[in-house]
Image (cartoon, grey):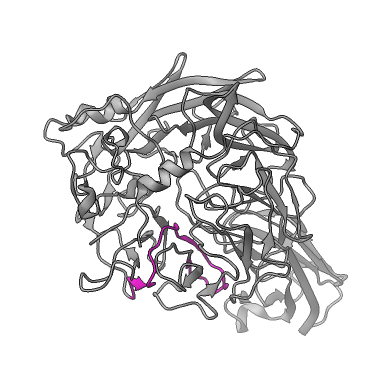
Amino acid sequence: MKKPLWGIAALIIALAIINPSASMAADPIKVILGNARVMESSVAVADFNGDGHKEIVVGDIKGVLYVISRTGSTWSVVWSRQTNLDIEAANPRIRTPDNNIRSSPVIADLDKDGHLEIVIGVGGDVHSPNRNERWNGGILVYRYNGSNPWGFSLIQPRSPDGTSGWPQPCKDEVGWPPEKGYSDPDGYWDGVWATPAVGDIDGDGDLEIVYLGIDRFLYAWHHDGRLVSGWPIEIPVDGGLSSPALGDLDLDGLPEIVVGTMSPASLSQSWKEATLWAVKGDATIVPGFPVRTEQILLSSPASGDIDGDGYLEIVIASGYGTPGRQNLVYAWNHDGTPVPGWPVEAPGASVVMAPPALGDIDNDGEIEIVVGCGNGYQADSCDKLYAWNPDGTLVNGFPIVLPSRMNSYTSMPYSPVLADIDGDGEVEILMGRLGDWGITVVNPIQGTYDLSSHQTPGGLLASPVVDDIDGDGFLETVIGGIDYNHGNERGAVYIWNEVGSANPSPPWPMFHHNVRRTGRLPLPPRLEFPSEIFVFHQYNSGKTAETVAILKNRGEGQMDWSIDHTISRLTVTPSSGTVSTQTPLRLTITTEDLMPGWYTLGSLTITASAGRSPVQGSPKTSSLNLFVGDVHRVYLPLITQRN
């Protein structure tokens, strides 16, 4: 049967109160927050004031939003706000003294004015029998106002009629009474526990905010608090825990919204036959969707081109409730058809509800899918970490059984993070465990794990972030959690300095990949260069012939490239470099000793890599052909290239 959310919350609150038996290794930098833990809210980082240091944004379970900044070598809280003060500006029916943040912060310049905004979801547990755990829920958007002193305010106050501005509360659809499964309104606006995503879904140039509320509605708002035309979309029966992903599934230039639900594709079906939805920015359903999983989806989808076909695939784990289907991981093509070899079973797992992470973890040039197992309310529900190849086969050495510092605190319901934190050229997998006192670091190539390097004086209940937050060119690992001071629980943020370089960027550095929380793995760099190059030279017109060939990166990010050849009469400028989009290569050929005719001069080989892995299309061999003769009378155009 379906687990009520209050049961999950009550059991989690009891976690991580036992002192770990292992001694601390390298102590992290610790920033104390208030008297409430950070739970399920993964920190976000961004440089608000342009000083080269990234600020840290995080929320706690009492509804306080914090911004942490660095002054000199010291990290400290520079701004905080009880979000309930702003939610209740919309005049709820029942008022409460504080609130609850389980959603992860989103950071983006929504209105393209050069200032970053923070988007945060708030709200309480609509299934709790304790009315003190019910808070009014919705979405808030804060604009950065400056750092002297630090200040943030709502980007636009709510209009009197509520049709624009912030806050924008959820509807009151569920929450009471217990005997009806909490399926009726309870007087409180339902909460937002899922994390929003932002992107330009309608092509208007600004960024829209998309999220799934516990009130069974999928929302899309403009930055100024106006609903996008056609929204919200009602999701029948249930929903609210899956965070949407944004990605251009049909290559029309606009991202689609993908989200899992706990609801059927039609009301005639059981709620256990949950669906994954894909919706266009105009609120129409993408052809081929929704797809039914016959299992509620508590996981959040990720998208990436895992099979190299140029289209995004969608990957998501599942949930619990339907025996035999709670340990499945799914992958669909952009048109809703299953990727060959999927879904896959996580052998030995009782529940697989964690959001997946995508990235090359074994340096084979392919994208792997990494998922932890276990649920969010039972600390010892699973101890295995899984990784699959694009074809659905397990990566060599997986699953890996991971012990914990805290005896049975092994469950991994949070998103893995993928980053090379030690600079050895091999990606590590960083796992926050349900209540464990530290981050587990896994080397997927060697099949080893480390429990000692990232310990904390309190439990962790979220995913970390790996980024260069102090501008030194090296990575840091950041996570929110709990600090215990002589038995008193406080919220805290922990920071570790790593030795791994920030360039190239980690493949999956945080929950839902980036601070916009799009859940999309950027298309990997892909080398494109002509297969044949033809050069035409007018006889007796000079000692050299020249042409330009374009080397292109058809993916995203940067790739390093070099060109090699044994053609003595050829000079290529430049012969190596780094390219984000494209770069021209000037080919100069010595022709002074050549008589009229065709010449096959030889081959050029271009290799390209990102990090230490070859990119798609590398190596690329191109043949160089030269014609010497009466070009002007016979041949047009003078230079051609054939891809």
Relative to 326, 608 lies left or right: right
Left or right: where does residue 64 sit relative to residue 157? Answer: right
Tell me how many marks there are.
Answer: 0
Up-down: is 23 above or below 640? Answer: above
Compare residues 343 and 19 and report the one nearer the observer: 19
Instruction: Residue 623 in the image: state x and y as whole percent.
Output: 74, 78
Q: Is residue 159 left or right of residue 410?
A: left
User: Residue 293 colored magenta?
Assistant: yes
- Residue at 53 percent of width and 42 percent of height: 461
The part of the chain drawn in magenta is: 288-315
Is residue 236 among the parts visible in the rendering? yes
Relative height, residue 411 to residue 316 (above, below): above
The C terminus is located in which quarter?
bottom right
Q: Where is residue 269 in the image (x, y as percent from the top left)?
A: 25, 73
Quadrant occupied by the N terminus = bottom left
Image coordinates for residue 162, horizontal then vertical, percent = 15, 36
The magenta stretch spans residue 78: no
Residue 93 sits in which quadrant?
top left
Q: Residue furthest left?
A: 161
18 to 360, vertically: above or below: above
